[in-house]
Image: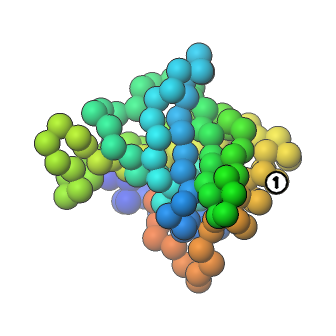
Amino acid sequence: MTGHRDFEDLRRFKRFRMTGTARAAFFATAREFLKLGEILDISLGGLAMRYVGFGEQPDGPIEVELFGSSGEVVRLGRFPCRIVYDFELADESWGILKVRRCGIQFRELSKQQLAQIQTFIDSFGIREESTPPDDADFAGSGS
């Protein structure tokens, strides 16, 4: 997708940059592993991640699993989500290995899942006044 930074920032949730130890893994609905990457920033509405891959994420429903380490490994269950954008970071890519940035929006989360994500943010988030915008959790996105 192109032009994602042209949108007005309509986010409903505060975005937090993450420490370098927070990761996300994507799975297809059929439980097939798709990608593993570093979480760049996260909110209760979605996240942005960087990963090495060969192409864009597949269409259709996916789930994301969050995990990290701060002395001990913290692993959360899987959360339903949808991909908002996925593009190559050309300046970071080399040869056939393409470094990509992907933004996702969480879908239909329970109160318990929201609490788990908040705990994850509290454990791995970097507190600061503002974070750079991207569009994984626009108020107008999704259903």
Residue located at (62% from left, 78% from top): 127
Name the foreground residue: 143 vs 18: 18
Q: How would you rate the neighbour count of disc 1 (Cα within 10 Å): few for under 14, some for 14-19, many for 20 or more?
A: few
Q: From the viewer's perspective, tell me whether residue 48 is left or right of residue 53.
A: right
Residue located at (38% from left, 59% from top): 5
Classify the position of the C terminus by image quarter.
top right
Element type at mark 1: helix
As displayed, is residue 135 above or below residue 51?
below
Classify the position of the N terminus by image quarter.
top left
Name the residue furthest right.
Answer: 111
As displayed, is residue 124 above or below residue 2?
below
* Image x and y of residue 98, in percent: 25, 43
Name the residue furthest top.
Answer: 30
* Image x and y of residue 74, in percent: 70, 52
Residue 27 visible, this angle: yes
Residue located at (55% from left, 29% from top): 27
Name the foreground residue: 74 vs 55: 74
Residue bearing mark 1: 115
Query: At label 1, which amino acid type do we have?
Result: Ala
Residue 135 visible, this angle: no
Q: From the viewer's perspective, tell me whether residue 51 is left or right of residue 109.
A: left
Instruction: Quadrant for residue 105, please give it.
Output: top right
Instruction: Quadrant for residue 53, please give it.
Output: top left
Name the residue furthest front.
Answer: 71
* Image x and y of residue 9, in percent: 51, 64
* Image x and y of residue 142, in percent: 59, 39
Q: Give the color scheme: rainbow, by chain, secondary structure or one colour.
A: rainbow
Name the foreground residue: 4 vs 123: 123
Name the foreground residue: 117 vs 85: 117
Q: From the viewer's perspective, tell me whether residue 122 is left or right of residue 51.
A: right
